Structure formats: C-alpha cells, structure tokens
Amino acid sequence: MRAKVGDQLIMEGTHVDDHRRVGRIEEVRHPDGTPPYLVRWVDGEQTLCFPGPDAHVQPRDGSR
C-alpha cells in the first residue's frame, strides 16, 4: 500500500455489524508512501494507522 498526504484511507468493517471507516491521510511517515499514516477520520479523531488487508487508499485525484 502506498499513499500521499491528502489521499483518503478507507477501512472496511471486518465483522457483520462493523461500519466502514473513512479518513484523510495527514502525514506519511516514509518517503516511499508506505504505512504508517497519520489519519484524521471523519468523526474528527486523529490516529496513527497501520492499515491491514481490509483497507485501501483512494487517491486525492479520484483515480485508483
């Protein structure tokens, strides 16, 4: 997984009642764009995130 500041991180729920979590990547810790990422989620919480296989990055320009 590779990302840039401004991209969207989307984490799908892993259980039946889990909700999708969406946030904006505010900081990328490695020059090659690999995790971890500092993410501001839509609920306002900010976390350092090590995305798993249930996550994907939506580039800021909308392409995949």
Image: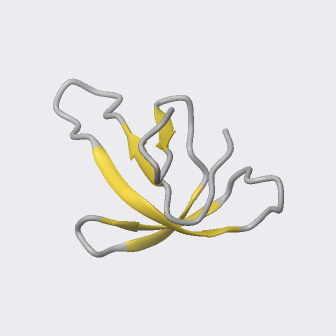
- Count of number-bearing discs: 0
Near-viewer residue (31 or 47): 31
Give the position of the N terminus as an image quadrant: top right
Near-viewer residue (26 or 21): 26
Q: Residue at x 73, y 53 (%)?
A: 33
User: Residue 21 in the image: x percent, y percent?
Assistant: 31, 48
Is residue 23 depicted above or below 58 in this figure? below
Q: Residue at x 21, y 40 (%)?
A: 19
Quarter of the image where one finds residue 4: bottom right
Q: Residue at x 82, y 53 (%)?
A: 32
Q: Residue at x 51, y 32 (%)?
A: 64
User: Residue 45 in the image: x percent, y percent?
Assistant: 33, 74
Near-viewer residue (6 or 39): 6
Q: Is residue 54 left or right of residue 33?
A: left
Q: Residue furthest left?
A: 17
Colour setup of the view: secondary structure
Is residue 64 depicted above or below 50 in this figure? above
Quarter of the image where one finds residue 23: bottom left
Q: Residue furthest right?
A: 31
